[in-house]
Image (tube, rainbow, N blue to C red):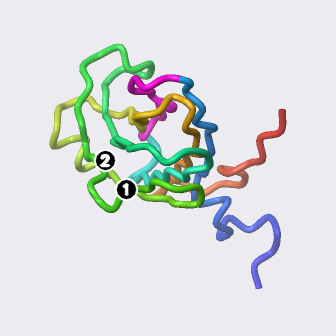
Amino acid sequence: MASITSPSKLTSSLKITQYDFDPDATTATEIEWIDMKEYDSLLVSFFRTVGTSALTFSLVGNAESDGSGTDYTICTYSGDEPDAAGDYCFLEANTQQLNELAAGLRYITAVCTVATGTDEGVVTYVQGGAHQAKLNLTAASIA
């Protein structure tokens, strides 16, 4: 059995972060730009906590860490609408897709738009394929 400090633990090979989505708007919201330099893949989930309106959910790549360069849409969710509290959906991307879109892309963000500004959710990023497993890639975030 692996010890608590073993790099074989999921928290040592995956980087998982969560973001509160409470835009108070119906415009496109970039969740968080993340660097894919040390990872091969990204799984993003949207979990609906409040509201029932339509959701547009996509992953966008950029060469700049703050998204100030040219945005390239990697993929857009097109399944059943997550239109009730407790509904969730997923998108995935990998660095090969970034390379195919344009040279130099290494940053990704999820972009969410809701039709009613009071809708809310939680967006979770799971970065996988870490080039080097190490302790605490995933760590608690306590404010």
Residue 27 part of the magenta-drawn span: yes
> Left or right: 21 with respect to 60?
right
Measured as percent of width and height from the top left, residue 96 is found at: 24, 50
Q: Which residues are magenta?
A: 25-36
Q: Residue at label 1?
A: 81
Can residue 109 be seen here? The reply is no
Determine the residue located farthest toward the bottom in the rendered image.
1
Rendered position, 89 above or below 117: below
Measured as percent of width and height from the top left, residue 141 is found at: 77, 41
Determine the residue located farthest toward the top in the rendered image.
68
Picture quarter containing residue 10?
bottom right
Measured as percent of width and height from the top left, residue 52 is found at: 49, 48
Secondary structure of the residue carrying numbered label 2:
helix
Secondary structure of the residue carrying numbered label 1:
loop
Q: Tell me which label, 1 or 2, sits earlier in the chain.
A: 1
- Mark pair 1, 2: CA separation: 27 Å
Mark number displayed over residue 95: 2
